[in-house]
Amino acid sequence: MLKLMTGTAIVLALMAGTAIAETKKIALVLPGPVTDGTFNSAANKGIEAAKAKYDIEVVVRENTDFAQIQDVLRSYAEEGYDMIIGHGFQFAEPVMEIHAEFPDTWFVVNTAQVAAAPNVASFDNRWGDAGYMAGAVAGLYTKSGTIGHIGAIPVPVIEDYNKGFEAGAKSMRPEVKVLSAYVGSFSDIARGAEITTSLIEQGADVVTSTGNENVVGTIQAAQKAGVQAIGTAFDSQAMAPETIITTALINMDVNIDLAVGRLIDGSLKPESYVLGLNENGIGLAPFRDFESKISAEDMARIQAMMKEFADGTLPPK
Amino acid sequence: MDEALFLSGLLAAGIRLATPIALAAIGETISQRAGVINVGIEGIMLVGAFVAVLVTVSSGSPWAGLAAAILSGAAMGAIHAVFTVRLKAEQIVSGIALLFLGIGLSGYGFRLTLAQGGTAVQVPGFRELDLFGLAGVPIVGPILFGQHALIYLAVIGAALLAFMLSSTRLGLMIKAAGDYPQALDAAGGAVDRVRFLCVMASGAFAAAGGAFLSTAQLWGFVENMTAGRGFLAISCVVFARWNPLGAIVAALGFGIADALQIRMQAGYPGVPYQFFVIAPYVVAIVSLALASRGSRMPAALGTAFSPQR
C-alpha cells in the first residue's frame, strides 16, 4: 500500500514537473506597494489578469528601492525566470547594466524607452497624449479659467503629462491659465492635498494629478473644496463620483498583457513599444454622471479630438 | 484683500501641516524629559493612522477611531518601554525596531482589512469645527475658530503638560527621571515606573498625530503616509529645548514654511521646484543648529537607569 502511494506520488510529481517546465516564470518588480490605488495597483491588476489568461507562474515584488534594483533583478535572473518586468523608468539603467549576463531572461521596462539585443524591451504609454486629453476636458469644463496640475516628482513621464495638459487646455481655450506644482514625493498624500488646496485658492476649479498615492490627496482636496478633478492612470471615479469628471487612463495592464503575450507566442523583440490611443495604451474613461453636465457642443469637441488622436492628426508634431 | 486671503489660506494650511508633527513632538518631549529617546514615533504614527481609519470605518465615528488610535499608540509605546526601561536595551536600537514594526504592522493590517476590496473606502472622518459660529469671519475666522477639534486639543494638551512639568510634583518626578534618576530613586521615587508611563504617553500622542493625518487632514490610509513627519517631530523637540509649548511653535514654524513653499512654487514656475521643496527642511536644519547652542538636554537622556546600591 505504502509502495503504491509512493509510486503515485512520484508519478504525480513527474507530471507536475513537466507542466512547470512549460509554464513561463515571470517576476514583476514594483517600486511601491500594490495598495497605492494607481501606478503599482494598476501593474498588479495587469499581472493578475495575465495570470488568469496565460499559463504563467508569477511573483510580484513590492517596495523596491532604487539601490536594490540591480540585486533584485540579478536574483530573479539567476533563479531562471523567463521574464522580469521592471515597473518604472528607474529600472532602465540597472537593466542595461546587467542584461548581457543573462541572455535567457527577458528584461522588460515599463514607462521607459530602452531596448537592447537580445533581451531588453520596453513598453511606454503616451503620457503626453493622456495629459493633452485631460487638459482639453479641463479647459472646456473650467468656469474660472484657471486649472491646475499637481505632479509627484518631475520625472520624464510626469513632465510629458504636464506639457500635454497645458497644450490640450490651450487647444480648447487659448486664454486658460494653467498652474502647476510638485509634491516632491510619491507617497506624501497630506502634502499632495495641501498643494491642491493652494492651487484651488489661486482660482483653479479643475485639477489633475500624476504620481502614486499623492493623486488620492488631490482628489480628496478637490472633493472637500467642491471643485472638479480629472483622474489619471486608473479609473477611480467610484472614489468621488461628484468630483471626478473623467480619468486620463494609462492602461498599464495593456503593457503587461502585451509583454507576456509576446513572450509566450515568441513575437517579443528587443524594441521599445510605445502605446498610444490606438494601441489602447491610453484613453479617456467614461464620463458617467458628468455626461449630462457637459454641453453637447463641448462633448462634440472632445469626441473630435479623440478622433484626431485615433487618425494621427494629434498630437501636434 | 488678495493678500489677506493669501495669508489666511497660508496660515490655515500651515496649521494643518503642523498638527501631526506637533502632536508627535509633544509626546516625544514627555518621553525625552523622562530620559527615554523614542526614534520610533514615525512607526507609531503609522499604526495610529491605520487604526484610526479602521475603527472610524467600522464604527462610523472618528472619535472612536481616535480613541482606538491612542490606545494602540500607548501599546506601541509600552513595547518600547519594555525594551528600554525594563530590559535596559539600547534606546536608539529599540526605537528603530519600533519604526519598522510600525511600518510593517500598519501596511500588513491595511492589506488584511481595508485594502481587500480593491476600491477606496469612504472614511467618515472629522470635519472642521465652527466655534461660536465665528468660522466665517474673514481671515481670522477660519484660523482661530474653524479648525479641527484635534488642533485645539493639541494646544490645550501642550499647555497642560507645560504646566504639569513646571509646577507639579509629577512634573518634578518626570524631570528628575530624565536629569538625575539617582536622586529620584534616593528620594523614594520609582524611576522606571515614571519612565514607562512617559514612553506610553509619547506613543499615545504620536498615534493621535497619525490619526489626525488619516481622519482629519485626509480621509484615508495609504502605506507610509507619514512621510518622515515623526523624524521632524524629534527635531522640533530639540529645537524647542524640551518644552512642549515650544514644540508646538517649532512645528508651526515648519508647517508654515511648508505651506509657503507650496504657494511659492506655482507663483515662480521658472525656479526649479526642488528649491521650494527643501525650504522647510533647510529651516529645520538651520534652526536646529542655532537652537543647539546652549541647549539643555535632559542629562540622563538615552541612558538606562540602574540603581547604585
Image (cartoon, coloured by chain):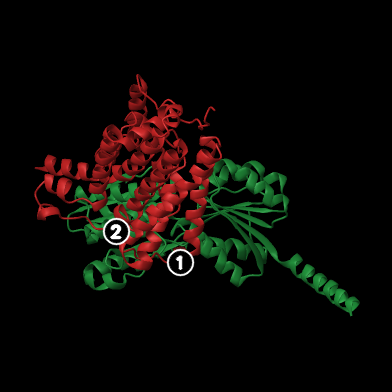
Chain colours: A green, B red
* Residue that carries the numbered disc 2 in the rendered image: A136
Residue B164 sits in quarter? top left
Whole-percent x, y for residue A67 in the image: 57, 40
Read off the chain for label 2: A
B283 horizontally vs A276: left or right: left
Badge 2 amino acid: Ala
Identify which residue is drawn at 45% across, 38% down.
Answer: B38
- Which residue is located at x 39 percent, y 35 percent? B234
Q: In terms of secondary structure, where does tag 1 sit?
A: loop
Residue B261 seen:
no
Chain letter for mark 1: B
Along the line of sight, the residue nearer the viewer: B5 or B110: B110
Q: Amino acid at mark 1?
A: Gly
Q: Residue B233: x and y, percent?
A: 37, 38
The Cα–Cα distance between marks 2 and 1, rounded to whole angstroms, is 30 Å
* Front residue (pair B290, A76): B290
Quadrant housing residue A11: bottom right
Q: How many marks?
A: 2
Circle 2: element type: helix
Q: Is residue A148 visible?
A: yes
In percent of the image, x 20 and y 49: which residue is there? Answer: A201
Q: Is residue B261 above or below residue A10?
A: above
**Nearer-the-camera pick, B179 or A249:** B179
Left or right, A26 with reference to B276: right
Badge 1 crowding class, 10 Å Cα cut-off, few under 14, some 14 to 19, many 20 or more, is few
Is disc 2 in contact with disc 1, using a CB cutoff of under 8 Å? no
Q: Position of residue A12 (x, y in %)?
A: 81, 74
Measuring from the top left, give residue B72's x and y in whole percent.
43, 54
Task: Give the residue number, with chain letter if any, for mark 1.
Answer: B118
Callout 2: few (<14), some (14-19), or many (20+) C-alpha neighbours within 10 Å? many
The vertical placement of A117 against B7, above or below, is: below
Q: Are marks 2 and 1 on the same chain?
A: no
